[in-house]
Image (cartoon, rainbow, N blue to C red):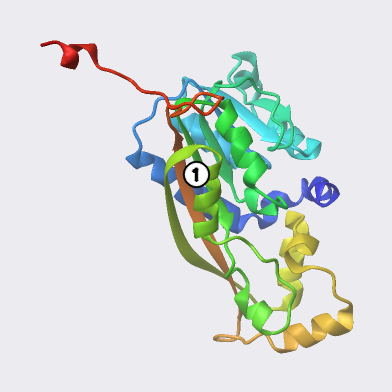
Amino acid sequence: MRQDFAAAAASYDSAAVLAREVGQRLAERLDCVKLAPRRFADIGCATGDGVRELQRRYPDALPLAVDFVLPMLAAVQERSGWWERMRGRAPRCINADARALPLAANSLDLAWSNLMLHWLPDPQPAFAELHRVLIEGGLLQFCMLGPDTLKELRAAGGPTPAFLDMHDIGDMLMAAGFGDPVMEMEMLTLTYPSPRAFLADQRHLGVRDGLLGRLDWRQWRQVFAGWERIDGLLPARFEIIYGHAWKMAPRTVPDGRAIMKFDRAKMRP
């Protein structure tokens, strides 16, 4: 999908209604978290709405904008003002895959990702890599599309992806070494006047083929004919899975032996 996202960089903001809304809801969940990061990263930052929101919340932290598509990172740079760049406050852009981050171990206090991880064939390697780069006590916060996304199109015969459910995602976080994962889910609905408007949005986002697969026009006509309208509009429902998890202190050493900690004060007679 790299080429699709690269081609969509110029049009992304015009269609990113869902990403902006979900990103804001994801950010609001930080209100309940006690965190003062020195360095954070927006993983799969697109044009940078997320990293700018995190900068607003944590103005003293070093912001990293990470994406595997160079045109998206160029958009992040273009949206940074010259004064911000002169003061060294613009996001540091890093062209990288979430599964192989060019960051030192234990170097991030907060890793954030808005509607990106579900595009990976398997998110497990990315979770393991994010665990590696977070400090002990660091936070991973993210959201992904869930399996009931566009279920109305699937009911009409459309080839929508088999996204992971939140229980599988929670298991992956535990397997990657995270502790205390918290998962939530909600359904959000966008409406469209026509299939053409829906397809245009997905093309502008660079996700049309990834989200809808490849059908010929006759097959799509059959799918869209079965897409039930509500009050004259076509509903597109998206299952949003929110998650956060902490990097806990290790319980074993690399050879598998358990780590035991003793409080000397409590051991005194």
Asked if residue 178 is positioned above or below residue 208 in the image, the reply reads: above
Percent coordinates x, y for residue 250 in the rendering? 46, 27
Count neighbours of disc 1 (C-alpha within 10 A) and say few if under 14, some if 14 to 19, many if 20 or more: some
Closer-to-camera residue (204/127) = 127
Kindly identify the residue that appears in the image at 40 percent across and 40 percent down: 30
Residue 258 appears in the rendering: yes
The mark total stands at: 1
Percent coordinates x, y for residue 164 in the rendering? 60, 60
Kindly identify the residue that appears in the image at 44 percent across and 53 percent down: 183
Percent coordinates x, y for residue 150 in the rendering? 63, 72
Closer-to-camera residue (46/162) = 162
The residue singled out by tag 1 in the image is 174
Q: Which of the 4 quarters of the picture holds residue 58?
A: top left
Q: Quadrant of the C terminus?
A: top left
Asked if residue 57 is positioned above or below residue 174 in the image, the reply reads: above
Residue 79 appears in the rendering: no
Kindly identify the residue that appears in the image at 66 percent across and 41 percent down: 125
Closer-to-camera residue (266/216) = 266
The amino acid on which the numbered mark 1 sits, given as a three-letter code, is Met
Q: Which of the 4 quarters of the picture holds residue 263?
A: top left
Asked if residue 55 is positioned above or below residue 238 in the image, the reply reads: above
Q: Which of the 4 quarters of the picture holds residue 104?
A: top right
Asked if residue 145 is positioned above or below residue 113 in the image, the reply reads: below
Q: Is residue 260 left or right of residue 265?
A: right
Kindly identify the residue that appears in the image at 61 percent across and 51 percent down: 115
Percent coordinates x, y for residue 49 in the rendering? 59, 41
Label 1 sits on a secondary structure element that is: helix
